[in-house]
Amino acid sequence: PASLRAFPFPCDIPRGEAAARSARGPHAPEAAPFPTRVESRLYWTHAQSDWRATAMTTQKVVLITGASRGIRETTARAFHAAGWTVAAGMRAPAASSLTPDERMKPYALDVTYDASVTAAVAAVMADFGRIDVLVNNAGLCLVGPLEELSKADDRALLETNLLGPMALIRAVLPHMRAQGGGRIINLSSGTPLKGVPFLLHYVASKAAVNAMTRALAKELGGAVGASRAVADLGWRPVA
């Protein structure tokens, strides 16, 4: 409906765009960032080796997904400015405005493709030998009433916002376990707390991310000998 065009969210993507993007393949343009987000932080350290102490004597490496634009690109620049080595994952590295150097390297990464996730994580490990922090920041937002969005839209959004982060976590955990620990940051949203209309898919996916983060914190705390595991939800304004 024409009335939805004025809906006050700059992440507005035309109805059916997710399905069209899926058909175009893994290098389609990324969605615009949502204006306000909530950070779901998962933190764990192995009981026998504190990763923070190790990071003091080795170069810290952060892998950021969706780092081609918006808050995701800003996050990559902020880590780089703070002295971190940044592995900037994105669908189309050639189109990135990030300037590559010895501590900033773009990687082809589409979180909806398992092969892409596996290859990107393997490439980062081959280049830098460790991943201290994973920032799951790639995201998709669809605006519109439920009855006008398709099953393909449903799948595309959930694959990006929920299954994508889970795939990255699954891929990096063995490396973090082997190096003695790490930190996982899942970027989420405050919309599940508000029940925002016409964002049903987005709201549901971010509610799932929040729940997944909390559950995984407990799973890692009990199953991998972690000395501490915390899921923390708090407002993080973009602008």
Image (spheres, grey):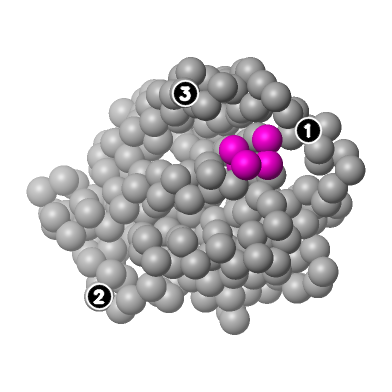
Q: Earlier in the sequence, mark 3 or mark 1?
A: 1
Mark 2 closeness class: few <14, some 14–19, many ≥20 residues within 10 Å? few
Q: Which residues are magenta?
A: 176-180
Is residue 15 toward the left or the right of residue 7 in the image? Answer: left
Image quadrant of residue 190?
Answer: top left
Measured in 3D between alpha carbons, the distance from the residue under mark 3 to the one under mark 1, in whole angstroms, is 20 Å
Measured in 3D between alpha carbons, the distance from the residue under mark 3 to the one under mark 2, in whole angstroms, is 39 Å
Q: Is residue 238 at least partly visible in the picture?
A: no
Q: Nearer the viewer, mark 3 or mark 2?
A: 3
Vertical order, 46 against 54 (above or below):
above
How far across and how far down the image is residue 102, in percent?
82, 69
Image quadrant of residue 227?
Answer: top right
Which image quarter is the N terminus in? bottom left
The amino acid at mark 1 is: Arg
How far across and how far down the image is residue 23, in percent?
25, 75
Q: Is residue 42 at least partly visible in the picture?
A: yes
Q: Nearer the viewer, mark 1 or mark 2?
A: 1
Rendered residue at 14%/57% (across/down):
150
The amino acid at mark 3 is: Ala
The amino acid at mark 2 is: Ala
Disc ID at residue 23: 2
Q: Secondary structure at mark 1?
A: helix
Disc ID at residue 223: 3
